[in-house]
Amino acid sequence: MLKFSNPKARQQAEQLMQPALIRVIDNIRKCLDDSPWAGRYQEAHIWPERATEADIQQVKALITQLEHAQPEQVARLEAQLAELPQPFPVYELHLTQGDQKKTVDLWDLCYRTCFKRFPVGDQAVAVDMTLWDQEMGDVNWVALDEKAKALVQQVFSELETQS
């Protein structure tokens, strides 16, 4: 789990993550257009260590029930879910070229885009303030796109050196 130095840093990171994901995916698409590698996206879930198999099955069953629940049942089902361990979504890009395979963690690319350094171990993450337009107090889209592009191109460059 990420640690933040203060609530403002958390808020800034939250504001950057969705645009970072969009820019990362767009730059991956551009690189795939010019690459011999084929890519497909996959969502997976990582469960907390404390989650038992019974917890996982119960969460899945409650989610299925929620999808078909009557409005008066929703609050009860959500309350039951809130008491159980929740999975953390992981978004991966699976790349293949012939018999070569590579998996790229999209959240890791987003974190590397949004923060000065990542990973940081037990330390608090620091938002890369060059990704903010200080005058407007909003995301600096050009800087965000350039950093995401550079990181994605680095991933594809490493693929070529490993081939």
Image (cartoon, helix red, strand yellow):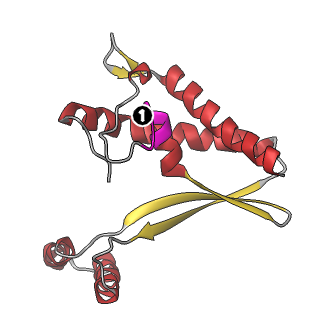
The amino acid type found where label 1 is placed reads: Phe
* Residue 87 image offset from top left, x and y in percent: 35, 69
Vertical arrangement, residue 138 with respect to residue 27, above or below? above
89 sits left or right of 5 in the view = right
For the point 53% across and 21% down, the residue is 142
Q: Nearer the viewer, residue 7 or 123?
A: 123
Location of residue 104 by image quarter? bottom right
* Residue 119 image offset from top left, x and y in percent: 44, 44
For the point 40% across and 42% down, the residue is 120
Residue 58 on the magenta segment: no
Location of residue 18 by image quarter? top left
Q: Secondary structure at mark 1?
A: loop
Q: Quadrant of the image for the N terminus?
A: bottom left
Q: Is residue 21 visible?
A: no
On the image, numbered disc 1 is attached to which residue? 115
* Residue 24 image offset from top left, x and y in percent: 57, 40
97 sits left or right of 41 in the view = right
Point out the stretch of residues depicted in magenta.
Answer: 111-119
Location of residue 134 by image quarter? top left
Vertical arrangement, residue 57 with respect to residue 129, above or below? below
160 sits left or right of 130 in the view = right
Total count of labels: 1
Q: Is residue 111 visible?
A: yes
Residue 117 on the magenta segment: yes
Q: Nearer the viewer, residue 103 or 49?
A: 49
Which residue occupies the extreme top position in the image? 135
